[in-house]
Amino acid sequence: MSWKLGGALSALVLLASAGSGMAEGELNIYNWGNYTNPELIKKFEEAHKVKVTITDYDSNTTALTKVKAGGHGFDIVVPSANYVPIFVKEGLLLETRPDQMPNFKNVDKKWVDVSWDPGRHYTVPWQWGTTGVAVNTKAYAGDPNTSAIFLDPPKELVGQVNVVPEMADVMALTIMYAGGKPCTDDKDLLRKVRDILTAAKPKWRSMDYGMTEKLSNSDVVATVNWNGSTFRARLKNPTVVYGYPKEGYPVWMDSVAVLADAKNVENAKLFQNFIMDPENAALISAFARYANGIAGSDKFMPEEMKTAPEIVVPEAYKAAGTFLPTCPKATQDLYTAIWTELQK
Amino acid sequence: MTAADPARQAQPAHSPSPGEVASRAAEVRRNWLLSTPALTLLFLAASGPLLVVILYSVLTPGEYSGVVWELSGDAWYRVILHRDIFDDTVSLADAHLRIFWRSAKLSLLTTFVALIIGFPTAYFVATRPPQQRTLWLFLITIPFWTNLLIRTFAIMEVIRNEGIVNSTLMSLGVIEAPIQLLYTDTAVLIGMVYVYLPLMVLPLYASMERLDFRLVEAAYDLYATRLQVLRRVIIPLVKPGIIAGSILVFIPSLGAYVTPRVLGGGKNMMLGNLIELQFGQGRNWPLGAALSLTLLVIVMIALLVYVRNVSRSESRG
């Protein structure tokens, strides 16, 4: 889910040491690129006299691989919902019991008993969002709330569409467009999915990340994109709109977890508690422009976020959203095969 | 060739004294000892990881990336053959073949364009007065000061729809709407030629610097035309430079990852991207390892062909 990488390709890990000052302790955070508010980190450093170091990653797989290899020195990781069970199963996370922390009372009830961490024994909500489409109304004024924007583009958009090369999201969108459920291994349906994708591909221009900038400067006028990124683009370019595909779209949440081999466990726990404070959670959202899971954080949010159609899912499209499960290996192989065939 | 040298053969056989033998053995020992650090480093840094890659290519992929310690030939099978996921028919893996072919084609084109641009550049530098050459060479190496990724993004800024090229052409009235350069194969070509050009110019310059320009003058004196001088005198003499430069450009182009990804829009994969997919979202490390080794073998074959050609042309010459 490399959308959080505003710039793209920070696979070349950028080491951003945020602030210095009098360090009594340390905390090493391993998080998605362009996703952590420096103000939040500064506030945490000052409140707890801790020196925080942030390292970026660009995908769940990258994070999982590096953490599994060991010797990384990170204390905190922020995996997506479908990766949390893998981290837990592989014994990579510490059971920090956030549900017993003082600030846990602030967590929105809806995000407490989640499928990937029932009762929140390991993780604390960071941000959540949706994967949909973004369209520049100057190029196409029709209804954007459909995956047909990229799977069967209207003639104004033929040859103009970008698709972010995020296999799990694109496959899920297409499967739901074809009438199936994410992680399906129904061969007939997958054949249909492949045919839809291969027929659509000649009508695309590119498969690239970094859509926040490219939508802002109109380099791209239609793309698969994430809500927060589209919101950031719209603030700079008011003709950009976000569409919730009515055929179905993925909902995701990234959660903060402490690693089993963390060296600064106490500071990491402090951080988990710290971000469950509504005022601090609002800082997270104010930067990356995704919603958080903390009740009462709205009143600390910037005004434009409270009503943004990218953040507040319209009633009519709520039912179409689905959390993506982690697909089994055999299913994953089918998807990779379709994906490779698509890009040959 | 040395064996055929009559002067050498005519020399009387030289029988070394026992002391000489001992000192030579000591020298050999010392040389081995001195080169041990380098050899160890080479072995660990080159062979070690390569062995890991070979090993991984015959293991079973783990469920969530990584490998499971069970031998399997599946990865190698899948490099070449493709079992259709829908009707289980087996055919050649045309997705992989096409991606290989696209990479090879674009790399050859990059090498060719870099040669066309690099040759006159190297000639120009080599024909400057010696004290000026250093400055020119210095200018050629300046791009290396900047990170590859940043240079690629800079190219992107230049060829964007609202970038320098398009806005200049539009303000001059040459074109009315921006030309779509970004996200095309042309963009990848421009990017790769730009990035790898110094690697072509430097070896070309090295061999042109040693070129005896009196031979060129002699050719003119013998009424050779300019084209004949180029074809019959200059090119044969700087051939090692041309070949070295071409190899230095071709090999990294073949595995290029960043440039196609940023400038090509990622719609059509190149080899580097295909390999990355297997290690990342594809969660199939053995296949990624097998594909990397396939790339390695192709490069080695290309080098062997080159070495044989060079030695043949040398023995002929």
Image: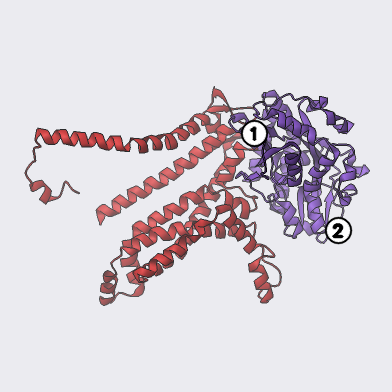
Q: Which chain is purple?
A: A
**Which residue corresponds to the image point at 64% horizontal and 56% vertical from the top-left?**
B183
As helix, strand or loop, the secondary structure at mark 1 comes to loop
Q: Nearer the viewer, residue B199 or A126?
A: A126
Amino acid at pointer 2:
Ala
Q: Nearer the viewer, residue A117 or A329?
A: A117
Q: Nearer the viewer, residue A247 or A179?
A: A247
Amino acid at pointer 1:
Phe
Examine the rendered structure and indicate whether residue B104 appears above or below residue B215: above
Q: Are marks 2 and 1 in contact (CB under 8 Å)?
A: no
Q: Chain of mark 2?
A: A
Q: Colour of chain B?
A: red
Q: Chain of mark 1?
A: A
The residue singled out by tag 1 in the image is A74
Q: Is residue B8 left or right of residue B107?
A: left
Which residue is situated farthest in the right direction here? Answer: A315
**Which residue corresponds to the image point at 40% horizontal and 36% vertical from the top-left?**
B41
Residue A141 - label: 2
**Which residue corresponds to the image point at 27% horizontal and 72% vertical from the top-left?**
B219
The quarter of the picture where residue B188 lies is bottom right
